[in-house]
Image (tube, rainbow, N blue to C red):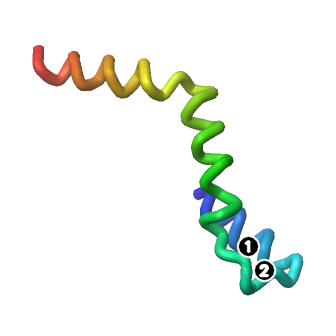
Amino acid sequence: VIDMIVASTLMSMGMMMLPPVMISLPFKILLFVMVDGWHLLIQSLIMSFR
């Protein structure tokens, strides 16, 4: 979803040569950190072995 939003925003601003991944990757990392991604990932891995 983040990639599609960034790509459509870049297209509307006329920046077709700029890869959307360069812009969306920091947003994805920020979102992962904000939702406490490491804790959720480790917790789901531990719960899958039980």
Q: Does the CB distance between marks 1 and 2 fall below 8 Å?
A: yes
Residue at 78% in and 80% down: 11
State the separation of the CA atoms marked 1 and 2: 5 Å
Percent across and percent down for residue 43 are 32, 17
Q: Is disc 1 placed on a helix, strand or loop?
A: helix
Count of numbered tags: 2
Which quarter of the rendering shows the N terminus? bottom right
Residue at 72% in and 77% down: 18
Q: In screen coordinates, is 27 left or right of 29? A: right
The residue to which callout 1 is attached is: 8
Q: In screen coordinates, is 16 left or right of 41? A: right
- Quadrant of the rendered structure where residue 4 is? bottom right
Can you say whether 3 is above or below 47 in the image? below
Q: Is disc 2 placed on a helix, strand or loop?
A: helix
The residue to which callout 2 is attached is: 11
Percent across and percent down for residue 40 are 41, 23
Can you name the residue that lies furthest to the top here?
50
Which quarter of the rendering shows the C terminus? top left
Percent across and percent down for residue 47 are 21, 17
The residue type indicated by label 2 comes to Met
Can you say whether 28 is above or below 8 in the image? above
Can you say whether 4 is above or below 28 in the image? below
Which of 4/42 is in front?
Answer: 42
